[in-house]
Image: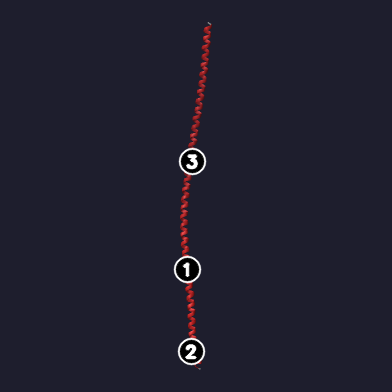
Amino acid sequence: GSSARAFSFTFNSAMVLGVENYDAQRAAVRSAQKQEDEMRKLMRDCAQQLGRLQAQHAKERSEAEGLAETLRKQAKALKGELQAERAQAVQAARALKRQHADNLRAHVTRATADTLRREVEASILRHALDDEEAFSPSAGA
């Protein structure tokens, strides 16, 4: 009887140990699955966040490129306007220079004409006076 009792105890101990081992294994598996689920969730969150950041970066880059293109176009337009204004200013300066030269020539021509007219008038007066003296009655006396 005692050997049967000893066997029964050993068997029961093995059963208890086996159940404990099984429970411990199941708890370890559950813990591992839980950690794996958390890890998957974390990776999914990270992937979503990365996706959002990449989309935001792409949007900002696109906006920056658009802004840069707009600024390039504006700069090109301004450069064109400045060149046009400069060309107009050069033309205006040339026209003023021509006008000044024309005015100066006209002034010199008028001054020369005035001088010539005065000289001619003076000469006519001199001749008239000379003629008057020549034909005056007191000349013969």
Residue 80 on image: x %, y %: 45, 55
Q: How many residues crowd around disc 2 within 10 Å: few (fewer than 14), some, or many (20 or more)?
A: few
Mark 1 or mark 3, which is nearer to you?
1
Q: Earlier in the sequence, mark 1 or mark 3?
A: 3
Disc 2 residue type? Ala
* Of 134 and 67, the residue lying toward us: 134
Which residue appears farthest toward the bottom when viewing the image?
141
Q: Label 3, on which residue?
A: 57
Q: Which residue sits at x=50%, y=24%?
A: 30
Q: Label 1, on which residue?
A: 101
Disc 3 residue type? His
Residue 75 on image: x %, y %: 47, 52
Q: Which residue sits at x=52%, y=16%?
A: 17
Q: How many residues crowd around disc 1 within 10 Å: few (fewer than 14), some, or many (20 or more)?
A: few
Q: Earlier in the sequence, mark 3 or mark 2?
A: 3
* C-alpha gap between disc 2 and disc 1: 48 Å
Q: Which residue sits at x=48%, y=35%?
A: 48
- 135 relative to 26, above or below: below
Query: Element type at marker 3?
Result: helix
Q: Which residue sits at x=48%, y=70%?
A: 104
* C-alpha gap between disc 1 and disc 3: 65 Å
Residue 135 on image: x %, y %: 48, 90
- 127 relative to 11, above or below: below
Which residue appears farthest toward the top when viewing the image?
1
Q: Label 2, on which residue?
A: 134
Q: Earlier in the sequence, mark 2 or mark 1?
A: 1
Residue 112 on image: x %, y %: 48, 75
Disc 1 residue type? Ala
Dots 2, 1 in contact, CB < 8 A:
no
